[in-house]
Image: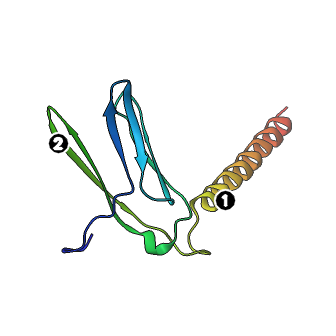
Amino acid sequence: MPHGHPWDIIGVCKEVENGLVSEDYSDRGRVSCTDTLDVSLHLTGVVPEDSGFYRCTFSTDAGVQTTTVVLTVNPPGGFSLSVYMMYIYIGAGAAGFILLTAIIILAVRHR
């Protein structure tokens, strides 16, 4: 977040009598809280303009813990990890098939 710009609050987790509850302040994000103090943020419909810093501040009687992450949203048609991983799996499968075929052919020839 550039210096001087306020942070937008997407949601909060609040302690109540029965545990923790989440309150969402944005229709583009959902905060989930658990009694084991696990917190997650799910953003929907992200666009490149959503790229930037996201901060989670957790305050208890023991103190305050802050974690900041950087989100990078690539434009459509850019790098896609799922497509990249698909190519790796297909390539590894094809290489494994060729290697197995070569081993079988060599084993049959040596008999």
Q: Residue at x 68, y 56 (%)?
A: 91
Left or right of residue 74: residue 23: left
Inspect the image, locate mark 2, and give the three-letter code of the amino acid beneath it. Answer: Val
- Seen from the viewer's position, the closer of residues 92 and 61 is 61
Q: CA distance from mark 2 to mark 1?
A: 43 Å
In this picture, is 3 found above or below 45?
A: below
Q: Residue at x 40, y 36 (%)?
A: 21
Q: Residues within 10 Å of mark 2 (few under 14, many from 20)?
A: few
In this picture, is 64 found above or below 25?
A: above
Name the disc covering residue 15, or none: none
Q: Quadrant of residue 82?
A: bottom right
Residue 68 screen position, x and y as percent = 28, 55
Left or right of residue 46: residue 14: left
Q: Residue at x 56, y 69 (%)?
A: 79
Q: Nearer the viewer, mark 2 or mark 1?
A: 2
In this picture, is 101 found above or below 78?
A: above
Of the 4 image quadrants, the one containing the C terminus is: top right
- Seen from the viewer's position, the closer of residues 81 and 38 is 38
Left or right of residue 66: residue 21: right
Of the 4 image quadrants, the one containing the N terminus is: bottom left
Q: Residue at x 60, y 74 (%)?
A: 76
Name the disc covering residue 64, or none: 2
Residue 16 screen position, x and y as percent = 33, 30
Of callouts 2 and 1, the N-terminal one: 2
Name the disc covering residue 87, or none: 1
Inspect the image, locate mark 1, and give the three-letter code of the amino acid beneath it. Answer: Tyr
List the single residue furthest toward the front: 17
